[in-house]
Image (cartoon, helix red, strand yellow):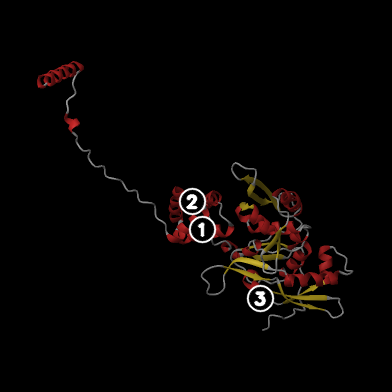
Amino acid sequence: MSPLILKQQDSQPQSQTVVWQHNSLAEARYSLTAREQKVLLYVISMIEAEDDELKLYQIRVEDFARLLSLQKDSLYEELRSVVSQLKVKPLVIRNHFEPGDKRPKNLLTSWFQDVVTEADGSGNIGVSISSRLKPYLLQVKREFFRYRLGYAIELRSAYSLRLYQWAKRWQFTGKRLITVEELRTVIGAEELDEKGNVKKKILPKFGELHKWALRPAVKEINNMTDLHLSYIEQKTPGTKRVEVLLFRITPNSHCDQLLAPIPDAPEEAGQQPELFPGDQESEEYLEEIETTFRLSTPQLKRVRLIAIDRGMEYLKEKVAVVMRMRPENAARALLAALRDDWQPAVEIKRRLRPKKQTADADVKSISPEEAREAAKALREFRASLA
């Protein structure tokens, strides 16, 4: 069966529609406008849970306009331009595995593969998602996050849309540490070239990023979605430079709950295989390690997987080895210690040789009076020789 099958009976997404995505997409590198992101999420939400192939999904312009409360006039032309951009704009997914790979790679692709438009410039627009994205969108039962389309589609800012998806990905933890540079990637505050490399930082200074992107995004998410975000800035010791942010992610108690909560899925218990279910002590220890070693998201994932494979005691042993070394790059040293099974340094105790006994060691101490008498006797002996 060809993957490009137009489903004429496709039901168009509604506010209640649930969007499923692999965790990797929340931290992928791409830069899209708010309208481009909304069209993308609209299409992704049309993927059915039982689909085993990506299809040619059609966007009914009238239904899209109704969901977003837009005027239909000239919307077809705008959507055609948007999907064309989604066909060429780069998407970089880190830690990607091809079948048979033993080491992760970076995948450079795009969101859309094909675009089918009406000859008269009206009606529907058909799009197919890049086939490389199958493991990230089809039958996602492990390492996934999900949310109601209605919450995301109402957000106005491109930064809000990206930050909301990232926060949904980490909602189960309640808090998440992220560097400023990682945050920049997560919210799309970067301009990429055709090879997926960062060509330019948008709002390069943290003060600008905070004022024009982060703070408004958090405010909009708190006002319009089912999440409430807050964060604490952590500065580099001895400087005013903000290096890390600690986010707290909680359900929004002030949400109007216009959208029904998502029911638990049977597979949801296994969505985060790298975690230690019910083992709060292990989770707290991993959070401490993440902060102490300033692990990036991919690095933390590798540490978790190794801890599951070899046990927490193995992890604690290697942490102790690295802590005693005090390396310049602690995160890299920890990963090397875990990979290569570094052992504690062996303490070599030097055997102390017995001191040589000197002639003076046997000399009996004498009193000052005896010393004067000895000196007098020595003078008399020299006088007799003369």
Q: Is residue 93 above or below residue 380?
A: below
- Residue linked to disc 2: 327
Q: Secondary structure at mark 2?
A: loop
Q: Is the residue under label 2 in contact with that under label 1 (CB below 8 Å)?
A: no
The Cα–Cα distance between marks 3 and 2, rounded to whole angstroms, is: 43 Å
Q: Residue at x 47, y 58 (%)?
A: 336
Q: Horizontal placement of 267 versus 371: left or right?
A: right
- Residue lying farthest to the top in this orientation: 369
Q: Which quadrant would the C terminus be assigned to in this image?
A: top left
Where in the figure is residue 290, as x and y percent of width and height? 55, 52
Q: Looking at numbered disc 1 in the image, what kind of residue is underneath it?
A: Val
* Mark 2 nearby-residue class (10 Å; few <14, some 14–19, many ≥20): few
Q: Nearer the viewer, residue 62 or 300?
A: 300
Q: Secondary structure at mark 1?
A: helix
Q: Looking at numbered disc 2 in the image, what kind of residue is underneath it?
A: Pro
Q: Residue at x 43, y 56 (%)?
A: 314
* Mark 3 nearby-residue class (10 Å; few <14, some 14–19, many ≥20): some
Where in the figure is residue 123, as x and y percent of width and height? 85, 76
**Which disc number belongs to residue 121?**
none
Where in the figure is residue 156, as x and y percent of width and height? 79, 58
- Residue linked to disc 3: 131
Q: Nearer the viewer, residue 52 or 338?
A: 338
Q: Is residue 188 visible?
A: no
Q: Along the polypeptide, which appears first: circle 1 or circle 3?
A: 3
- Residue lying farthest to the front in this orientation: 386
Q: Is residue 225 visible?
A: yes
**Which disc number belongs to residue 303?**
1
Q: Nearer the viewer, residue 340 or 122?
A: 340
Q: Horizontal placement of 110 versus 347: left or right?
A: right
Q: Secondary structure at mark 3?
A: helix
Q: Looking at numbered disc 3 in the image, what kind of residue is underneath it?
A: Ser
